[in-house]
Amino acid sequence: MKVDNPSKHKIQQQQEEEEEEEEEEAEQMCRTIEVASVVDLSSQPAPVVTGDEVTLIPPLNFSMVDNGIFRSGFPDSANFSFLQTLRLRSIIYLCPEPYPEANTEFLKSNGIKLFQFAIEGHKEPFVNIPEDMIREALKVLLDVRNHPVLIHCKRGKHRTGCLVGCLRKLQKWCLSSVFDEYQRFAAAKARVSDQRFMELFDISSLKHLPMSFSCLKR
């Protein structure tokens, strides 16, 4: 005869409650906009045409980070045709301000999902980068189901630079290379506080997540 163990059920219940709390916290940190899985190609905006040529304009500070991962400043309508060539599945937006209506319509018409992490853009010495939000944004970034993905903030320098820098630590880059890349985009606006954050960021809780980026393939 099998006898149920009350303490075992209690432990399982506690574990389920903790998992639900973690999911709720993650949802509060990340605002998402769901889009239709079926995309009407006829509704997409036409590219800019100059004479007989199509002009594609990348967003400010645009660059490829790795296979399926891109970074930039805030894209506007002039950049939409270029973004279409990337065939994005998602965008990671690192600012607290609401996404502009024109950008939201572009995402919906192209089947792109928006993940918003409301990180304030304060200047030094009042910079406070929320480690928990960067951690949740990294989880979204590492999930290949969200690729191709574009990361952007306002200028593509500080908040975007910090997220990419933490990704580089997971990719086992040395700190000097992480800082060199950050400074290449931040230029004269580089912040000691950002670099300090990247240096101290603990990646141990994310090492279990699968990564399939080009720099890790042999």
Image (cartoon, rainbow, N blue to C red):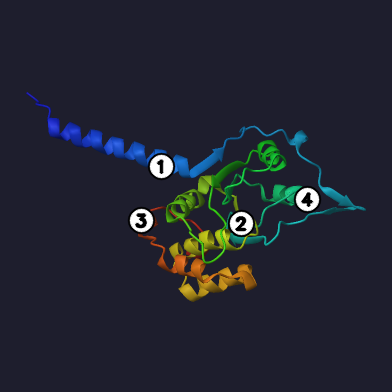
Q: Secondary structure at mark 3?
A: helix
Foreground disc of the pair 1, 2:
1
Type of amino acid at the residue the image marks with label 3: Ser
Question: How many other residues sit within 10 Å of disc 2, few (<14), some (14-19) or many (≥20)?
Answer: many
Looking at the image, tell me whether mark 4 or mark 1 is earlier in sequence order. 1
Q: Look at the image and tell me whether residue 101 can be seen.
A: yes
Q: CA distance from mark 3 to mark 2?
A: 24 Å
- Per the image, the residue denoted by label 4 is 78
Q: Residue furthest top?
A: 1
Q: Measured along the vertical axis of the image, is residue 149 above or below residue 124?
A: above
Question: How many other residues sit within 10 Å of disc 4, few (<14), some (14-19) or many (≥20)?
Answer: some
Q: Residue at x 30, y 35 (%)?
A: 17
Q: Residue furthest front?
A: 125
Residue contact between numbered discs 4 and 3, judged by CB atoms under 8 Å: no
Q: Which mark is residue 205?
A: 3
Q: Secondary structure at mark 2?
A: strand
Looking at the image, tell me whether mark 1 or mark 3 is earlier in sequence order. 1
Nearest to the observer: residue 6 or residue 142: 6
Q: Residue furthest bottom?
A: 176
Q: Residue at x 9, y 26 (%)?
A: 3
Looking at the image, tell me whether mark 4 or mark 3 is earlier in sequence order. 4
- Per the image, the residue denoted by label 1 is 25
Looking at the image, tell me whether mark 1 or mark 2 is earlier in sequence order. 1
- Per the image, the residue denoted by label 2 is 70
Res 157 quadrant in image: bottom right
Looking at the image, tell me whether mark 3 or mark 2 is earlier in sequence order. 2
